[in-house]
Amino acid sequence: CIPHGGGGPGMGPIGVKAHLAPHLPGHPETGGEEGPVTAAPWGSASILPISWAYILMMGGAGLTQATKVAILNANYVAKRLEGAYDILFKGGKGRVAHECILDTRPFADSVHVTVDDIAKRLIDNGFHAPTMSWPVAGTLMVEPTESETKAELDRFITAMLSIREEIAAIEKGEIDPENNPLKHAPHTVNALIGDWDRPYSREQGCFPPGAFRVDKYWPPVGRVDNVYGDRNLLCTCPPLESYAEAAE
């Protein structure tokens, strides 16, 4: 299927109550009192042929099988991580749907390890973090879909279990709560080959369990101060005068 998430672009009908209808986005081509929110009148129409082609190629049987495998994969991940992490929103039989939500909030309360720390540490393992803090703040929503192999699922599980062991080491007082692989993640190649002044080994920092040694992904930068970046905008765009000159 096509990548999704991030809040858009989207395509589909939007239903609202009558008193909100006058406030729906308008467009010069279609009218409406409000201004447009997208370049096209009806959203990102290019999504529709992709979805249509996917459904056509899969057929009813293929879509059913893909859905079954996606649900199976999510429950496999949830079952393997159960006990290391709390799994939210399980059904009456202890199962989840096509995704599982890992609750990391207890670690923030106990040892100040946040969901951001875990997400950054996953980069050292070669994983882009799952959906973070949605639909519950301080959680990771894992949605493996039908396309991941069991080997890749196992590699992700190994990474998450190793992260839990690092959190446990902080809980036991075995490692510094503020100077550890989680707080310094992700680790760059420059950190690996430079002067190493951290209380854990290069091996532990750069090659945690589940990480590839051959063809390993190396992040271009280390930990970024997200809050500072959000509050202090640094624009690298050309000055506004250059746009005015180009328009002339």
Image: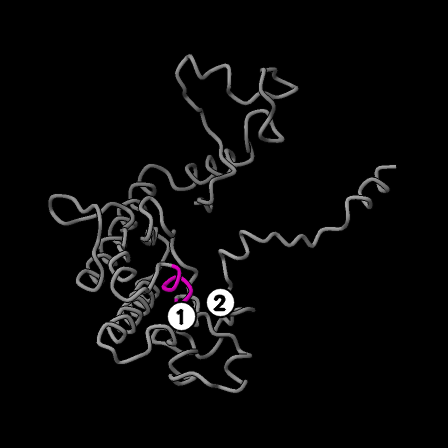
Residue drawn at (26%, 55%) of the image: 103
Mark number displayed over residue 183:
1
Q: Position of residue 198 (x, y in %)?
A: 43, 83
Residue drawn at (40%, 68%) of the image: 121
Mark 1 vs 2, N-terminal side: 1
As for residue 117 lying within the magenta part, the answer is yes
Q: Label 1 to label 2, Cα distance in Å?
A: 8 Å
**The N terminus lies in which quarter of the figure?**
top left
Residue drawn at (27%, 68%) of the image: 164
Q: Position of residue 66 (x, y in %)?
A: 32, 46
As for residue 32 lying within the magenta part, the answer is no
**Residue nearest the observer in this picture, 4 or 140:** 140
Task: Check disc 1 and give the amino acid type.
Answer: Lys
Task: Check disc 2 and give the amino acid type.
Answer: Arg
Q: Is residue 130 above or below residue 215?
A: above
Q: Position of residue 74 (x, y in %)?
A: 27, 53
Mark number displayed over residue 224:
none
User: Does the residue at mark 1 contact the one at mark 2 (Cβ under 8 Å)?
Assistant: yes
Locate residue 90 relative to residue 219 in the image: left or right.
left
- What residue span does the magenta drawing correspond to? 116-121
**Residue nearest the observer in this picture, 178 or 193:** 178
Task: Determine which residue is flagged by label 2.
Answer: 223
